[in-house]
Image (cartoon, rainbow, N blue to C red):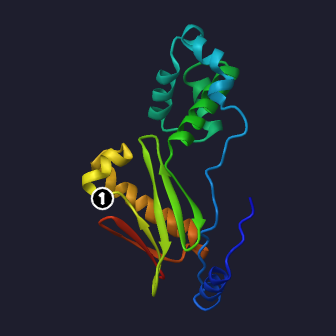
Amino acid sequence: MLYIMPLEHFILAFVLSTVLGLGLHFFKRKKSSNMRQSLFEEEAGFIQNLKTATGKALPEWFALIKGSGEKGFLDIRRWLVETQKLATSPATTIAQLYLEDQERKAPKVWFSQGGRGGDFSYESGEGGFTSWWEFGGGDTLAILSVPVQEHWEAQTGIPLAKRAEVLEFIGRETVRQQTTGGRGTFEVQEGIILIRVQ
């Protein structure tokens, strides 16, 4: 769906881009939908028979790969073939499944806009939440509302001990995604994150 920017937002974006060298990109951005089946769905039979075929279930293979320290597809597949003595075909599938699992669990932030603000969402393998954001004033480009400490676990499903880490990630990702060239700063306060001109 095409988003048409209101004139006042166009002028604000033009001024920020031209005068300050910054620009906010708080345009409609939805979570990308996966048009194809996930590899986990495609390989359901392989996963079901994996322990019989290889002596280990998929979670056991994932734990071994994580412990190996290998990161990229080719390195993981090579490690499975050379160290674990798997044939290339199952090693390929296990490596692909591991990387897809890591991608699904990786934290993500995305934004949508409506008028002078909108919503943003955070999601990770542990939980997530959706809240509002709005344009700020002065050197504050935007204000993001986040769950306060006393409601954090109930609203997000994420342990309170990880709250600061999650809010830092949201701040960094907002600056990276929504400012021109990532030139901006963020400040975490109780209940909000401020995105500022650097």
Q: Is residue 27 left or right of residue 142?
A: right
Element at badge 1?
Answer: loop
Q: Residue furthest bottom?
A: 19
Vertical order, 171 against 15 (above or below): above
Amino acid type assigned to the residue bearing label 1 in the image: Val
Left or right of 127 on screen, residue 117: right
Q: Quadrant of residue 17?
A: bottom right
- Toward the left, the furthest residue is 150
Q: Looking at the picture, how far across and down is residue 1, in whole percent?
A: 74, 58
In the image, 191 versus 55, the foreground residue is 191
Residue 54: give x, y in percent of width and height. 57, 12
Q: Position of residue 61 (x, y in %)?
A: 51, 24
The residue depicted at 59 percent of the width and 37 percent of the height is 99
| Relative depth, front residue between 83 and 187 | 187
Badge 1 is on which residue?
Answer: 148
Residue 63 image position (x, y, % from top left)? 45, 28
| Vertical comparison of 88 with 74: above or below | above
**Residue 78 seen in render:** no
Count of numbered badges drawn on the protein: 1
Q: Vertically, is 188 above or below 84?
A: below
